Image (cartoon, rainbow, N blue to C red):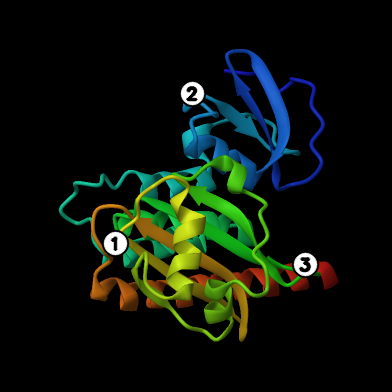
Amino acid sequence: MPTSSDPSVVLGGSEWLICNAGVTVGPVRTELLLRGVLHGRVPSSSWVRQAGWQRWRELAKIREVSALTRVLERAPDDPSHNPACLRESRDAVAQASDAGEALLLALHAAARATSATVGLAHRVREPLLLPITSCVFEAPIELLGQVLPWHDAAFSLARCGGLLLGPADGGAAQRSSSARLGQGRNLIGVAMVPVISAGRLCGMLELGRNDHPFRDSDASALADFARHVGAVLAQLARDRRAATFA
């Protein structure tokens, strides 16, 4: 266990130092910490701390990591592995400390609940107001940071509040999502759900399956889950504004 006297400089409360086997790295933002956990780059034996903390804490005892772990621990062959699991994941998403974390947790919850093979989360950011790929599920890490063009068919559907669920080789929106998600995979079905917050599009979740299409029941479950994610993002925005003017 590292000692509390280890020298460190942390740039902000949402950044972490990570210590494992006597080696300390960081600071890294919470979203990057969670990505490291997801992709196995941050070992479960690690200890972490933020600025102002007097002691290091075990990685598994960090609130955000614990929330993500609850999502990941649902095994694909678990009998309860179905869209109803999305309701159980709401609390985990609600614990996110920023929009990036919320979308990361939402993507993995949605992918596992629907048995998706691959998934992407895109966040609409200013000043471009275009979706930027911010999280991946079983997709190449190189896709992070890609910007979807305004004319992208799936993005056009999302701007209208439309949800996509169908064969990978269906209409223009399906083919657009399939090309992005495929990356060498032979996908059978694709899904896209927009995340609306305070009346505006703030994100998109895209999912793909290579065994069989998504079920009709997935559509309503994903739409309901996306509404919850949008409400979480709206609350995070209100909290951020309140902190700014406090």
| Residue occupied by mark 3 | 243
- Marks 3 and 2: which is nearer the front? 2
Question: In the structure shown, which secondary structural element does the residue marked by tag 1 occupy?
Answer: helix
Q: Compare residues 13 and 23 and report the one nearer the observer.
A: 23
Categorize mark 3 by other alpha carbons within 10 Å: few (<14), some (14-19), many (20+).
few
In this view, the residue farthest toward the top is 22
| Residue occupied by mark 2 | 45
Horizontal side of 201 relative to 222 (left or right) equals right
Instruction: State the CA–CA distance, disc 2 to disc 1.
Output: 28 Å
Categorize mark 2 by other alpha carbons within 10 Å: few (<14), some (14-19), many (20+).
few
In this view, the residue farthest toward the left is 79
Instruction: Check the image and report above or below for 208 versus 78.
Output: below
The amino acid type found where label 1 is placed reads Cys
Residue 170 visible to an observer of this rendering: yes
**Are dots 3 and 2 in contact, CB under 8 Å?**
no
| Residue occupied by mark 1 | 85
**N-terminal label among 3 and 1:** 1
Residue 246 visible to an observer of this rendering: no
Total labels: the figure holds 3
- Marks 2 and 1: which is nearer the front? 1
**N-terminal label among 3 and 2:** 2
Instruction: Check the image and report above or below for 4 versus 120.
Output: above
Horizontal side of 233 relative to 61 (left or right) equals right
